[in-house]
Image (tube, rainbow, N blue to C red):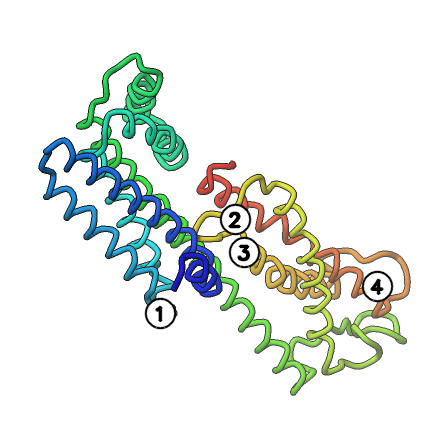
Amino acid sequence: MDTETRLRTLFSRGGWRAEIEVRRNEEEQRLAAATHNAAAAGSEHETHVKAARSSLERARLAIDSKPNLIAWVTGSAITTAWESVHQAGAQLVELESDQAVRSSLPRLLDWIGQVMSKGPMRDRYETELTAIIEGKKQVDRTLVHQAHQDVLTSNNEWHANLRTFRNVLLLTGAVLVLALLVLAIWHAINPSFVSICDPNAAKGHHCFSGDSPSSKDIAAIELVGAIGGMLSIAFGLGSEKSAPSRYNVRFAQMLLKPAAGAATAVVGVLLVQSGVIVAPAQRNSETLFLAYAAVFGFSQQLLTQFVDKRAGKLLGTG
């Protein structure tokens, strides 16, 4: 299978597989060049060569692994693949010429700025690696190799936090959707369950959809509330400045908002009907209550903004 066909096949199974395969091919080419140059100079770096090849082989096996739910939840395949590629890059530091090592440092420096927390360690690496790039300092292979190891640790911690946050959001959304479905189905079977009626209201329209509870009341409110929640997704899209990380928490956020909108719509309409929130001085109607449902559904943004802020911090945008 040629490289282009392989990349298309991998992309169809998940964009991250094709992305890592591109990086793996780059590292293989660097390894081949470094091995040739070392052989021509009579140098012996067999240990590092074997370690680099072993890492690249682990990356290939992880890329070619069959997708499954457990690997998706735990991130085992993608973590192994990326980690192996980066470990191969660290081994190349011991094999390549000074010029080749220096040319690879801008990518390492950018990676440090993305995943390593601000502090003395990051400041040290940024200062010393920049000096090497600018030719103000000789290539320090020990320093570069250690930078690879430390940034790999930071990278794994960062993505572990993202993965956990994504899974919590998806689990929360799934539980909320399940609860809303149970509520709607139970109400459809028994309209008196969570009846949207106000016995003290004037005759003519003291229930959500008329003079008596209807089996579709809760479902209609949840649907309109979910639509209101979907409208608030625009806030998240407006603040998006870069492509999502390997764990797309933005997608999990977007899935949570319609569910939260449906839930807040039901609670809001119940509050209006109970008199806790004063309704407009006009005759109640189904249209009025649906408008309330849409407003309350959109207002879930006030609750989910805390989730958005947390996501922004994890992604480095907040």
In what element is the residue under mark 1? loop
Rendered position, 262 above or below 254? below
Of pointers 3 and 4, the one earlier in the residue sequence = 3
Q: Residues within 10 Å of mark 1 (few under 14, many from 20)?
A: few
- Mark 1 or 3: in front is 1
In this picture, residue 288 sits left or right of residue 38: right
In what element is the residue under mark 3? helix
Of residues 288 and 122, the one nearer the viewer is: 122
In what element is the residue under mark 4? helix
Of pointers 2 and 4, the one earlier in the residue sequence = 4
Mark 4 lies on residue: 288
Residue ID at (41%, 61%): 6
- Mark 4 or 1: in front is 1
In what element is the residue under mark 2? helix
- Mark 1 or 2: in front is 1
Mark 3 lies on residue: 251
